Amino acid sequence: MSNLLEEVYAIPGGEGVALCIQCGTCSASCPGADRGLSPRQIIGMVRADMREEILSGDSLWLCASCYLCTVRCPRDIRPTDLMHALECLAVRDGVSSKRTRTPLMYRTFINSVINNGRVHEAGLVTRFYMRTNPLAALKMLRLGLALLSHGRMPLRARKINGRRAVRTILDKARALAGTQ
C-alpha cells in the first residue's frame, strides 16, 4: 500500500497538503481544535505518514464542517475537505476511534436514505440510540414528542419513488471513495 501522503494527494484537493506553510490560521479558526488535534497538526501528521495515529483518533470526526479553516487559509488549502477525505480512508480501512460514534451515525443515516430514498428521522434516531446507548434516548424524549406533535417527525417512513436512483448514486459515491 502507498503511504498516506500519496493517498491524500490522490484525493481531489489533497494536493494542498504540500502547499501548507503551517501558519496556524486554520487551527486558530477551528472550533474543534481544543478537543483534539488541530487541522495544522493533522496536516503535519499526514506529511509525516502517521496513518494509524490520524485514522484511529477522534480529531477528524470532530470536524464541524464550518469551513472557517478553508475560508481563512492564505494558501487556499481545504482542510475541511481533507478531514472528510481522511474519514473516508478510515472507513475504507476499517479504522476508527472507539470514543466517537460519528461513523456509526453516518452509516445509520446512509442506510436510512438507501432504504427510503430520504432520511427517516424517527428510524434514524431509534437505530442510532439502540446501537449506542438506549438510555441516552430518554434525554431526547421530550424533544422527540414535541417534534412528533407538530408533525415534524413522522413515525412511518415516507419512501420516495426514486429510491433506486438514490441507491445508484450512493453506490457510485462509495465506489469513488473506495468504501464499498
Image (spheres, rainbow, N blue to C red):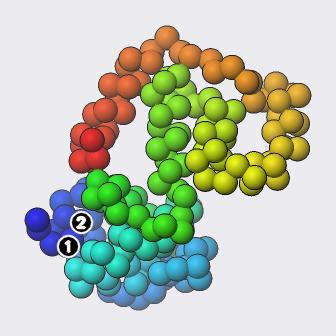
Three-letter code for the amino acid on which mark 1 is drawn: Leu
Check disc 2 and report the residue beneath it.
Answer: 8
In the figure, 62 relative to 156: above or below? below
Residue 108, numbered circle: none
Residue 92 placement, left or right of 29: left
The answer to whether 52 appears left or right of 67 in the picture is left
Q: Tell me if residue 93 comes above or below residue 19 in the rendering.
A: above
Query: In what element is the residue under mark 1?
Result: helix
Q: CA distance from mark 1 to mark 2?
A: 5 Å
Residue 160 spot, x, y in % from top left: 53, 15
For the N terminus, give its image quadrant: bottom left
Residue drawn at 54 percent across, 58 percent down: 101
Instruction: State if disc 2 and disc 1 touch (CB < 8 Å).
Output: yes
Relative side of 130 to 79, left or right:
right
Identify which amino acid the numbered label 2 is placed on.
Val
Name the quadrant of the C terminus.
top left
